[in-house]
Image: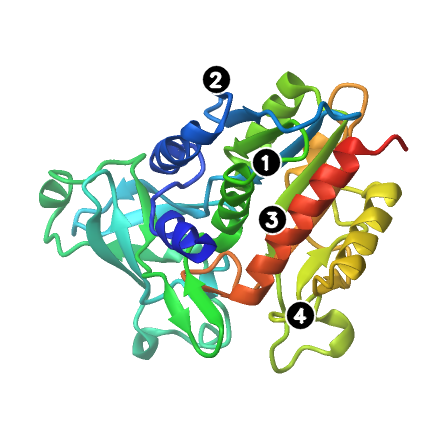
């Protein structure tokens, strides 16, 4: 079940550069269904599955395994841990957040200067990450460094689960949801041969997908990603980007890619013909692995299908299960149609 796969993926630890847990889980799950599975030098998983037919176009589907997180930069004399962000994180969402630190997954909590000690002008300012710290209960640097060292990672300690009516909440939904979709498609009977990439280090510069795209050398690619849903109070209608519960998101452009018009129209036709709920991404914000895939080698025709997610890059995101299913059906349909198309 797609939700069960996402639940397992969400609770794994995989900050950019240390996606090992996620990679091992994915390989274990997909290997019985694939003809070839390999891991390249940047840690991305490249899988190939034969279908009933040989496609007209070599097509690659891509979702990234990594999540945003924190990296320890120093240990203070009082045992508190200083850190930097790995990927884009808004410091406003961090204070009081529980985290797990290092290979031992040591419990910690993110703290800041107490509000009653703030000086004039500080009350109205958002905290800077450099002013925050992680408290692991250590009373000294010596005690803390028995467990934690600079270079260790910290991830958000968030439990995946149902939320409200038809919603799901959890961490790393960007882009474990995309990984779950690809894993589900791999387990199905395919109309034609397809390549699947589970990339690394998307959150720090689209690095894994760049190498994987060069190796696979596809004619076409579909990136499956989570994208910001700003359907919350205080945001005007034209700035909401997309809405949770409104279906799969089809993008025409973002900050790194102008998407292939033919694939864009094909996605719309498939969604309409199959009664798959969908929406346009209202804006050209953000970016994803398509930014480095589409200009690999001599150029790759690329499309993106995204899942609306509230509170992206925070300790806890919120998605709709119906949107997740819509993304899966649209991606599967588009992949096979595009791969078999002669246009």
Q: Residues within 10 Å of mark 3 (few under 14, many from 20)?
A: many
Q: Which residue is mark 4?
A: 246
Asked if residue 76 is positioned above or below residue 122 in the image, the reply reads: above
Which numbered marker is on residue 205? Answer: 1
Whether label 4 touches label 3, CB < 8 Å: no
Q: Residues within 10 Å of mark 2 (few under 14, many from 20)?
A: few
The residue mark sitting in front, 1 or 3, is 3
- Residue 225 at what x, y percent from top left? 60, 48
Q: Residue furthest front?
A: 52
> Which is more N-terminal, label 4 or label 1?
1
- Residue 65 at what x, y percent from top left? 47, 39
> Which is more N-terminal, label 3 or label 1?
1
Which numbered marker is on residue 41? Answer: 2
Which numbered marker is on residue 104? Answer: none
- Residue 196 at what x, y percent from top left? 58, 31
Asked if residue 175 is positioned above or below residue 293 in the image, the reply reads: below
Give the secondary structure at mark 1: loop
> Which is more N-terminal, label 1 or label 2?
2
Q: Which residue is mark 3?
A: 225
Give the secondary structure at mark 2: loop
Q: CA distance from mark 1 to mark 3?
A: 15 Å
Q: CA distance from mark 1 to mark 4?
A: 29 Å
Q: CA distance from mark 4 to mark 2?
A: 38 Å
């Amino acid at each position: 079940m797609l939700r069960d796969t996402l639940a397992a993926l969400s609770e794994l630890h995989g900050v950019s550069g240390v996606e090992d847990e996620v990679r091992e889980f994915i390989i274990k799950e997909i290997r019985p269904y694939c003809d070839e599975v390999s891991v390249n030098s940047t840690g991305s998983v490249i899988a190939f599955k034969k279908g009933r037919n040989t496609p007209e176009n070599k097509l690659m589907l891509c979702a990234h395994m990594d999540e945003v997180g924190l990296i320890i930069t120093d240990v203070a004399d009082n045992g508190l841990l200083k850190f930097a962000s790995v990927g884009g994180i808004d410091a406003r969402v961090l204070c009081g957040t529980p985290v797990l630190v290092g290979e031992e997954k040591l419990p910690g909590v993110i703290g800041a200067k107490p509000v009653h000690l703030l000086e004039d002008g500080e009350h109205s300012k958002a905290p800077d990450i450099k002013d925050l710290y992680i408290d692991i209960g250590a009373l000294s640097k010596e005690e803390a460094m028995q467990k934690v060292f600079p270079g260790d990672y910290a991830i958000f300690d968030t439990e995946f689960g149902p939320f409200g009516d038809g919603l799901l909440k959890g961490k790393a939904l960007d882009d474990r949801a995309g990984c779950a979709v690809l894993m589900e498609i791999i387990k199905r009977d395919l109309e034609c041969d397809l390549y699947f990439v589970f990339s690394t280090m998307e959150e720090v510069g689209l690095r894994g997908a760049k190498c994987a795209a060069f190796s696979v050398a596809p004619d076409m690619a579909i990136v499956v990603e989570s994208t910001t849903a700003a359907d919350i109070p205080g945001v005007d209608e034209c700035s909401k980007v997309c809405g949770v519960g409104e279906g799969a998101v089809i993008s025409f452009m973002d900050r790194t890619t102008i998407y292939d018009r033919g694939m864009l129209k094909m996605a719309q036709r498939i969604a309409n013909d199959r009664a798959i709920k969908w929406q346009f991404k209202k804006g050209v914000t953000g970016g994803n692995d398509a930014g480095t895939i589409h200009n690999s080698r001599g150029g790759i025709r690329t499309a993106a299908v995204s899942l609306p997610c509230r509170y992206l890059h925070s300790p806890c995101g919120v998605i709709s299960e119906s949107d997740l299913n819509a993304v899966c059906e649209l991606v599967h349909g588009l992949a096979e149609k595009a791969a078999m198309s002669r246009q």
